[in-house]
Amino acid sequence: MNPAQLVSSVPTGLLIGGTWRDSSDGATIKVEDPSTGEVLTAVADASVEDGKAALDAAVAAQRDWAATAPRDRGEILRAAFEKISARADDFAMLMTLEMGKTLAESKGEVTYGAEFFRWFAEEAVRVHGRYSTSPNGATRLVTMKAPVGPTLMITPWNFPLAMGTRKIGPAIAAGCTMVVKPAGQTPLTMLALAQLLEECGLPPGVLNVITTSRTGEVMEPIIRDPRLRKLTFTGSTPVGRKLVEQSAEQLLRVSMELGGNAPFIVFEDADVDRAVEGAMLAKMRNIGEACTAANRFYVHESLMEEFGRKFADRMKALTLGRGTDEGVDVGPLIDAKARDGVAELVQDARDKGAEIVLGGKPAEGRGYFFEPTVVTGVPKDARVMTEEIFGPVAPIASFATEEEVLELANSTEYGLVAYVFTNDLSRMLRVTEALEFGMIGVNQGIVSNPAAPFGGVKASGFGREGGFEGIEEYLETKYVGIAP
């Protein structure tokens, strides 16, 4: 399917109760190709009324869906995994068109995102409780699991497929219905995924999808509705804080995957070439537009020159361009606001005395491109060291001692992921225990894995997605005491 045909094949309405429909007031949202700024298509722009209708549908479907056999729920996920895998090229092209990443990266996301459906297809039949006797022998204690209930899912634009599948997968497996609100910049992948799940036999009302530019206006009434039982959000920490405040009224079950400020630490005993390879993955995956992206690099002073030179050479060799073109390594940022924000961070570092070794400015021409950038001699008070960059910029600073770098690494409100490169086993244990982060990559630049619990601490949120822990976010524990 060519790009135009692919885009035209995706539903552009709201999916509510098994029916695709326009927004109640006829409003639409334009979807842009960030590599050109051109409009790909327009999708429905949900109103408050549409949001209520989506929750109505989820509530109406909850009882029957919770009573559906776990095997049947799992088989739907398994079928969806197989269909996504069979349509990998189409999903990859769709993501590249609306988000900007290269086709190679999009294909990697398809593989990663589909795996959540396969993983939770297997977990659906493994939800269990326990039976025991009370200590005094007078009561039999039975614990069981039950679905949390109707869930609101708000997903970001940077991983249009995977951020959906790792929420939808465990919800389906656990027996929860849901309302999904994908990002306005990248709604097409989620709409295509919803259409695919319909094909796999997911009953009407279990998954409802509403796209809207009026996010706060439409989401708040849903969050404050007593029929909603869970909220899950992936996005920025400031927005996450507001959502948690709103969720307190109904005492919702909440899981938040928020911002990051990942340190990438290279100790003096590290393999420099391996560290550079890990740095490229940790920094440049998804154009740096990832909460797990290495945000600040700390390199031991003895390796600073070698690491900096080799890393800059690798960054310099990257080709900037449209993600659909052959030979391109780095696509555009999502929009003009994102590009301008990255430029401000680089300028602040320059003003504070840092040296721009490579890049440092937006690329000329159409689209929202920013050059791969390496900045050295960055002071710790530079904004680029304290704020999430979300772009292809690597600020590097040196350190002298383990104690010093641990203090630098932990001196942030965030705690999502950290990366450590060392060949000293004792140091690895000391450092990973001391780092205040929910995930740590040791001698590797990628930590995301559907079989592992993804999530952070501190201002990076709470709750876990993926792994054995992922389905627990969608289950309540019920205890029954029985007199023998």
Image (spheres, grey):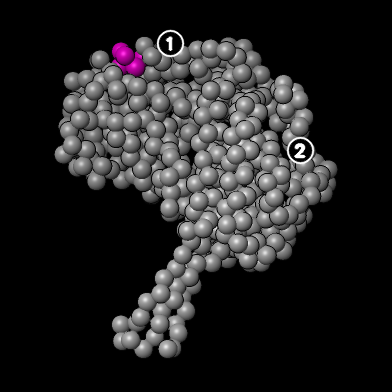
- From the image, which quarter does the N terminus lie in? top right
Residue 444, given in percent of the width and then of the height, sits at 33, 31
Q: Residue at coordinates 29% horizontally, 22% vertically from top-left? A: 274
Q: Which residue is mark 2?
A: 12
- Nearest the camera: 445 or 231? 445
Q: Is residue 467 above or below residue 125?
A: above
Residue 451 is at least partly visible in this image: yes
Residue 371, given in percent of the width and then of the height, sits at 49, 16
Q: Residue at coordinates 54% horizontally, 50% vertically from top-left? A: 121
Q: Secondary structure at mark 2?
A: loop
Q: Residue at coordinates 69% horizontally, 38% vertically from top-left? A: 192
Q: Residue at coordinates 40% horizontally, 82% vertically from top-left? A: 140
Residue 295, given in percent of the width and then of the height, sits at 39, 31
Name the chief secondary structure element in magenta. helix
Q: Is residue 68 above or below residue 133?
A: above
Amino acid found under the numbered disc labelled 1: Ala
Q: Which mark is residue 77?
A: none
- As for residue 293 lying within the magenta part, the answer is no
- From the image, which quarter does the C terminus lie in? bottom left
Q: Secondary structure at mark 1?
A: loop
- Classify 10 Å Cα crowding around label 2: few (below 14), some (14-19), many (20 and above): many
- Classify 10 Å Cα crowding around label 1: few (below 14), some (14-19), many (20 and above): few
Q: Which residue is mark 1?
A: 317
Q: Which residues are magenta?
A: 308-312
CA gap, disc 2 and disc 1: 39 Å
81 relative to 421 in the view: left or right: right
307 relative to 97 in the view: left or right: left
Question: Which of the 4 image quarters holds residue 276?
Answer: top left
Residue 210 is at least partly visible in this image: no
Amino acid found under the numbered disc labelled 2: Thr
- Nearest the camera: 96 or 185? 96
